[in-house]
Image (cartoon, rainbow, N blue to C red):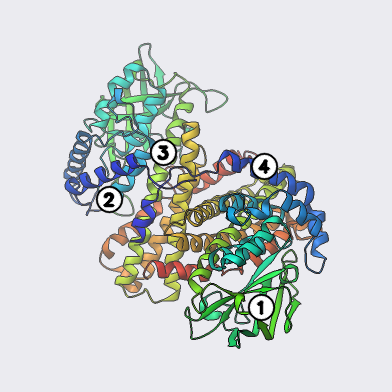
Amino acid sequence: MDFELSDSERAFRDEVRAWLKANAPRDTEADGAGDMKAFIERRRAWQKKLHGAGYVGITWPKEYGGRGGSLMDQLIFNDEMILAHAPEPINVIGLGMGGPVVIAHGTDEQKKRYLAPLLSAEEIWCQGFSEPNAGSDLSGLQTRAEDKGDHYLVNGQKVWTTLAHVARWCMLVARERKEANPRDGLTYLLVDMESPGIEVRPLVQITGDAEFNEIFFKDVKVPKAQILGEAGQGWAVAMTTLLHERGTLGLALATRAQITAAELAERARKLGRGDDPLVRQKIAQHTIEARALQLNGYRAVTAVKRSGIPGPEGSILKLMWSELNQRMTETAMDIAGAGAQVGDGDGWKYQFLRARANTIEAGTSEVLRNILAERVLGLPRSR
Amino acid sequence: MFVGAALNCRLVDFAFSEEQEMLRRSAREFLAKECGSKVVRRLMETPDGHDPALWKKIADLGWTALGIPEEYGGVGTFLDLIVVLEEAGRALLPGPFFSTMGLAVPALIEAGTASQKKEVLGAIASGSARATLALTEPAGRWDAEGVRLDAKQTGGGWQLDGVKLFVPDAGAADHMVVAARTRGEGEDGITLFLVHGRPQGMTVTPLETLDMTRRWSEVRFEGVRLDADAVMGEPDKAWPRLKRALEWATAALCAEMVGGVQKVLETSTEYAKARHQFGKPIGIYQAVSHKLADMLVLSESGRSATYYAAWTVDADAPDRSLASSMAKAYVSDAYRKVAGDGIQVHGGIGFTWEHDMHLYFKRAKSSEVTLGDATYHRELVAQALDL
């Protein structure tokens, strides 16, 4: 067991820290607040700048435009980004899921075509999985991909799609054939969002923002060169996508939780509530859980370093973070008393509302508990 | 400052070595054979929970030398001891192993004079002696303020008067480290004494304990005369040494607790697979499986917090005090919750004396209130956050 950074890791950390200090814009606005278009362009420019400095796709192979760095380098970079309060790059879905799934399942041509513009933010990605009648049960999806020889004809509807309104590519799971097992006969397509027949409508959330969209597909032509993995074997590709979503995302969330806990302690001091024993107990407990979450992440990384892909243990991170984040934002509101109802509460009001989605998006807490029960503990499947 | 400190020590290698994993396997095998439920239950009924024959086997395996410096006969690191303690907790090993290795050994390492270490650590390492720490008093406090037992200089030596309560395994201990008040208040004026055997005026009265696998006693000092060389280190200034010893003790206790949590989780999971109701294994029902998933989260998180605390103690990292408080706060709540839910998953059979689940439930409670409960440690964390 060893928690000290090596000399080269320390040097990389110092380099990143200095670069972010000189270059990072302060992330003062809540996501999507104000002029959406200007916001998107600022984030796109920021990713370009990061990319120019070699900080995008840190663990991706050099031949596809990545840095060819280690998992440790990625972790160090993530932590420094959060410590610097630097904004996320625009292509969160592409970098977290799109790129890794293309690297895992794509052909050489696909890797050459998609990865470089994804890294440079020329092309933004979105994820077309959920549908009005397929939420937790993804295998119930109804969007059809009809085989027309050299292409598919796609018809259907996707929902809760982050960035769909600005994305160039959509990771789409559609049904090619009806099979006895609903997980069979699905095909994973990379759909050009500029294709005729696609309509994107924003969905206004409880925060008042429109982070998510609905996408409607009407006779959309998708060339067969844009199948990812094997036709009819889309379920396996989708599962790789979700493992990356919960695994790598989980680690970033773990660090974020520690920042949130520290900000909460700061808020308690500012509001003069730091002497209240109940407040002290609550904030200490949040801080301890945030730390335990991060340490779980470190143990999961040790396992990933050995096996190469994130395991179902990554589900623990997402489950813990989402519920902890809700409790933390509740405490932040509680300690403001009646003041919680007015003003923007230094951004906590937004976080308090936004946190309600945390236990739903990227796998509901109920689905994650099923995963832990079935895949980690080996309990019988409930469905 | 706190966040920076936490973020600046990152993962390089968060796992035990291959040798430590071998030690774990052999410890689990040994305890399954030598310390099964029958043995635990037999020792529960004895006056001091100590089985000299079992102790000899444990010493022969080298467990009583773990974490002790080589110059005093030790072999292996604190992390090796952590591995064994986790297995001891899993098996509910009764007797003075934790009190000796988790409480007395660090106090001796931190505060003992060279000759005290040579004599007592040497005897512990070789398996010929057991020891404990007498810290708490009727007020039940784990901080410096709680140390009131009076020690006065008389002639060339010292006289001790007062009562220690909740002293683990005092009945089986050959040596006892005693925290006494020699002047003032708070952290100033605390002196540690090393007491051998039972000097005149010292009485040990066993207490009836909820967790019968843990023996606690009242130790009364009435005009107990000690020689000058009974003082450990410098008089009046022992608290900082004792505090470091308590960090070791806390990480060690958490390791035992994590072993118990894991065992309860495994037993309950197996039961949920085997037990059928309404024609199906009960683990298929989400009311049961989600409870087990939550137990898994508590188990894994407690383990992470504990291993990290153990590493900070072993590496003498600057955040060892904070890390051990975080671990104890988390694991105290986690073990009580998991052991309670373990009974619930088992239904009626889990509430019987015959089933082992209550032994873990009771061990969870006794461990929770040893070395400070979750509320106590959360307050220490709040202080570290400058709240």
Res. A25 visible in picture:
yes
Q: Position of residue B122 (x, y in %)?
A: 66, 59
Task: Give neighbour class at mark 3: few <14, some 14-19, many 20+ (Cα, 10 Å).
Answer: many
- Give, as a three-letter code, the residue at label 3: Glu
Q: Residue at x 63, y 65 (%)?
A: B367
Q: Please state which of the two labelled residues, at mark 3 or mark 2, is closer to the viewer.
A: 3
A284 on left or right of A9 = right
Residue under pointer 3 = A245
* Residue furthest out toward the top: A149
Task: Give neighbour class at mark 4: few <14, some 14-19, many 20+ (Cα, 10 Å).
Answer: some
Vertical arrangement, residue B260 with respect to residue A230, above or below? below
Inter-mark Cα distance, 4 to 1 = 36 Å
Q: Please state which of the two labelled residues, at mark 4 or mark 3, is closer to the viewer.
A: 4
Q: Residue at x 62, y 50 (%)?
A: B75
Q: Position of residue A321 (x, y in %)?
A: 44, 51
Closer to the camera, A20 or B203? Answer: B203
Please tell me if label 1 and label 3 are on a single chain: no
- Give, as a three-letter code, the residue at label 1: Leu
Residue under pointer 1 = B165
Mark 1 touching mark 3, by CB under 8 A?
Answer: no
Residue at mark 1: chain: B
Res. A310 visible in picture:
no
Residue under pointer 4 = B25
Element marked by disc 3: helix
Vertical arrangement, residue B256 with respect to residue A272, above or below? above
Residue at mark 2: chain: A
Mark positioned earlier in the residue sequence (3 or 2): 2
- Give, as a three-letter code, the residue at label 2: Asp
Vertical arrangement, residue A88 with respect to residue B181, above or below? above
Residue under pointer 2 = A209
Task: Give neighbour class at mark 1: few <14, some 14-19, many 20+ (Cα, 10 Å).
Answer: many
